[in-house]
Amino acid sequence: MLFQSPFQPEPPFTHGQVPRTAVLLCNLGTPDAPTAPAVRRYLAEFLGDPRVVEIPRLLWLLILHGIILRTRPAKSAAKYASVWTPEGSPLKIWTEKQAKLLQGWLGQRNHQVKVRWAMRYGSTSIASQLDAMKAEGMTRVLVLPAYPQYSGTTTASVCDAVYAWAAKTRAIPEFRFINRYHDDHGYISALAASIRRYWMANGKPDQLVMSFHGVPARTLQLGDMYHCECFKTARLLGEALGLSKDQYQVTFQSRLGRAQWLEPYTEPSLIKLGKAGVKRVDVICPGFTSDCLETLEEINMEAREAFLHAGGKEFHYIPCLNDDPEWITALCNLAQKHLQGWPTQEAPDAAALQASRAAALALGAKQ
């Protein structure tokens, strides 16, 4: 029996290959279409990730395939359809645009790097983009998750996908990972600027609600720092806006199942505000850098209806950073900081190099 290598065939190594650098912008993922079959495929991969649901594996797989994937896809597909655009999923559109803009911003600073985008779940996958980068001769890759706050359920899962690809690859590129930027000055400033612009056009609310994606409460006891980083982001954003602590509050959305998740929950908090006589709330989702189902449907539709039904008068959703120039600048600064020491500058052409050397020799002869 012939020995079979566990590694995929790769192009032969080329001696003297010029090192090339790439950035991989990774977001969570989205179905390929707002249909039940597409959502089922997506949820099977997403909810099948042990990083996302941390309960005994066999029990969870029975629940997932026996109940959830039989009942939830049709309902979720209808929600996706409510935010779907002619160009496709909003999350995919914004992530792709951010990657293109980031490459342009870096290029203006003479960083000749290739920027690609990928989704942790669904297409375009992290593995397929790493394959493409390797085929293009990339020898160094900076992995940039779209999650400002670190969590094992998100950031670490991106690392898992990269490591899984590397486990099947013979010649592995050099990797760097950006784990968090919840307190990055550029990120906070971009958020604050977007809110100020919104308030200049629409006036200020009685209460600003900062809604972050929720995770099970037990993750905090197990060592996940996500909860703390969300609150630090909120504190820094509140300070940048000059708000007192009673002018904003932090909530957590997207609860799944009956277990206790990080509190307070977003929708119940909005209902409480409405019943308490608060007339206007503005809601922003700082943990999402691109608008998606969780912001456009869960917040701007479901949460809006809940607040108004509870007695609130005005509900304003402040969009995510998306392609905001100040945000892309912050993203560029973040990438540039983590690219330090790698060869990213454009090499001078031979003629320019020869002219430079001649000028140096002439200057030396004069001295």
Image: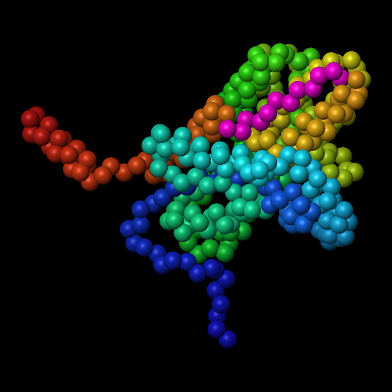
Residue 276 position in % (x across, y down): 91, 17
Q: Give the vertical position of 228 relative to 145 (above or below).
A: above
**Magenta segment:** 312-323
Residue 329 position in % (x across, y down): 51, 30
84 and 332: which is toward the camera: 84
* Residue at point 54%, 28% (across, down): 325
Asked whether the viewer can see residue 249, the reply is no
Asked whether the viewer can see residue 99, the reply is yes
10 and 283: which is toward the camera: 283
Q: Give the vertical position of 161 relative to 8 (above or below).
A: above
Q: How is the image coloured?
A: rainbow
Q: Quadrant of residue 314?
A: top right
Residue 319 lies in magenta, yes or no? yes
> What is the quadrant of the N terminus in the image?
bottom right
287 sits left or right of 133 in the view: right
194 sits left or right of 81 in the view: left
Residue 223 position in % (x across, y down): 74, 41
Residue 207 lies in magenta, yes or no? no
> What is the quadrant of the C terminus in the image?
top left
* Residue at point 76%, 52% (across, down): 35
Q: Quadrant of residue 163?
A: bottom right
Secondary structure mostly seen in magenta is: loop
284 sits left or right of 256 in the view: left
* Residue at point 71%, 51% (across, down): 33
* Residue at point 47%, 40% (across, down): 103
Q: Give the vertical position of 349 relative to 56 (above or below).
A: above
